[in-house]
Amino acid sequence: MREIVVVGTPGSGKSTFCRLLWEERPSLGGACAEFELPSLPHGFAETQKEPFKIAVPIRNFMLCAGCALCQKSCPFGAIWEEDLWIDPFLCEGCGVCVKNCPNRALQLANMQIGEIIEGKAGERKFFSGKLFSGARGAPRLLRALRERYRGDGDVVLDVPARYGEFLAAALEEAREVVLLVTPEEPALYLLDRVSFLAPKARVYLVLNRIREEDPLVSQIKDKGEGKKFELVAEVPHHPSPQEAEDGLRKALSAFLDLAKL
Amino acid sequence: MRLAILSQRGGVGKTTIALALAEFWGASLYELELGFPKLWPSEPEDLEPVNWRLSRFDRRKCDLCEECVKNCQFGALVREGEVIKHRGHRCRGCGLCKEICPRRAILLKEVKLGEIAKETKGWGPIYAARFVRGGAVEGVLWRRLYEKYPFEEKTILKAPTGLNGESLQAVKEAEFFVLLTTPDASGEIPLFAEIMQGIGLPGAVLLNFSTERGEEIRAQAESSGLFWAGEVPPLDDLSRGLREAYPAIESVFSNLIQGGWGG
């Protein structure tokens, strides 16, 4: 099974690249990690939907003696001293408080925070996910999504511009990564980050929206070369969307040759 | 007032708007996008490493009881054949495995997770944090940043991209939330309105790269109970800053700040 993970800087053409790749190679399945406002591609019908749950500590006040051992033991400072309220924005769901409660007043409960959606058009599959509004757990949903489609044929994963733990989850054990960047200073740091998050991956580098004589272009290329990233294409900046897409199309055919896809 | 700037997608001009607003308002600015901090200082002041403990596994002491595998909530420990494999990139350093291991085969070790720094601009400071390695326990870095640099009277929190719980976690101390959106977005305003209803604090919408659809989007925002801050047209040359390229931004900003305070 091959999995092509497509990541990059904002506005670097990630989604367009995924769409073109997908049009070009009908044998590939697709997946998108846009969990806040998910959509299936045109012509796809939802065939399966399964709940996505994570473990959350729940306090049973009938058993709680207020000893505050949970509060003292929480490694993330997520339990308030005053009323032992568990702050959902700080709680990681590790279960240390549950283990430390002498009265068994705390339990980990599986709570649904989203769903994994599978769509089909003929034999072709598309995997997507939805996170309930404001829910925390996007990186874990991404891991679950990847586990869901693994073993279901070749797939291209479109990863939106989220760079914290989410990017780590997207690149975990990735073997083939397409990295699209526009020439801007922070892109250099993203190159570093991709190389340490996906140390075993073959990384294909696409430079998009290049303006003439931009000194950053050679810096990015040098850095990419130093990390043994394979430079696929340098796409010039085009003001018109159609020309920009044609530019990416050329990058795509270079990628398909290089990746023997 | 602590104001958060959020966006659902990248590339909508959050950095440009946040910088111009901080300058206009004379506020301190927190860059909270840890994995790709565009406002990481070119010459960092007070650079400080942020350490966090992660578990380390000693295979010689392990008798494969699998207690740790069963209890780790993050899937950081898995059995593969005759060994327990520790996937460090999933570990969040809670220490549960160390506590429950009957053979004491697990230790916690301090590692450098990231770093924080500051940069002083003419109008005030920028505070930023970033990861330096694979592990990505975001809350630890945000917490350290807020501990070291307590909020000042006027504060702007530039949230990581996204309208999910992780982005909200970064800006949980904000009192006023501004969604930066663009005319081609669909579904962002209802989602943001729903989130703001849950939080119970005021929210505003600022439209970037506006088109003739501006009025329509304004109506959508206002009917969702959100404050309309205004709109910024697409601008060709931002090399000298947003305020130079679009002087009318000042009235948008003062509207935003007054409206946010009142509303």
Image: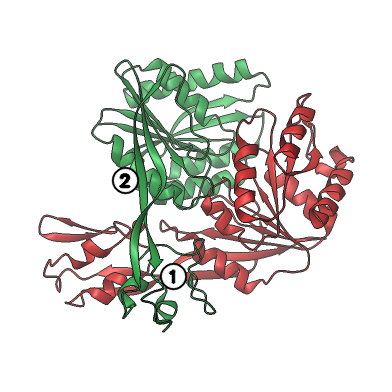
Could you tell me which chain the residue with mark 2 belongs to? A
Residue at image position (73%, 44%) is B226
Check the rendered structure and report the hue given to chain A. Answer: green
Amino acid under label 2?
Glu
User: Based on the displayed image, in which of its 4 quarters is residue A120 positioned?
Assistant: top left
Residue B134, given in percent of the width and then of the height, sits at 41, 56
**Label drawn at residue A21:** none
Category of crowding for the residue at label 1, using alpha-carbon neighbours closer than 10 angstroms: few (below 14), some (14–19), many (at least 20): some
| Residues at discs 1 and 2 both on one chain | no
**Label drawn at residue A173:** 2
Residue at image position (49%, 50%) is A135
| A55 to the left or right of A163 | left
| B157 to the left or right of B87 | right
Residue B140, given in percent of the width and then of the height, sits at 50, 66
Residue at image position (15%, 74%) is B61
**Residue B208 versus residue B176 in the image, above or below:** above
Q: Is residue B207 visible?
A: no
Looking at this view, is A14 or B259 the one in front?
A: B259
Q: Quadrant of the C terminus of chain A?
A: top left
Residue at image position (59%, 47%) is A186
Residue marked by disc 1 = B52
Disc 1 element: strand
User: Based on the displayed image, in which of its 4 quarters is residue A230 positioned?
Assistant: top left
**Residue A115 versus residue B217 in the image, above or below:** below
Residue B230, given in percent of the width and then of the height, sits at 81, 39
Q: Quadrant of the N terminus of chain A?
A: top left
As measured in the structure, the alpha-carbon distance from the residue carrying label 1 to the one carrying label 2 is 23 Å
Looking at this view, is A136 or B190 the one in front?
A: B190
Could you tell me which chain the residue with mark 1 belongs to? B
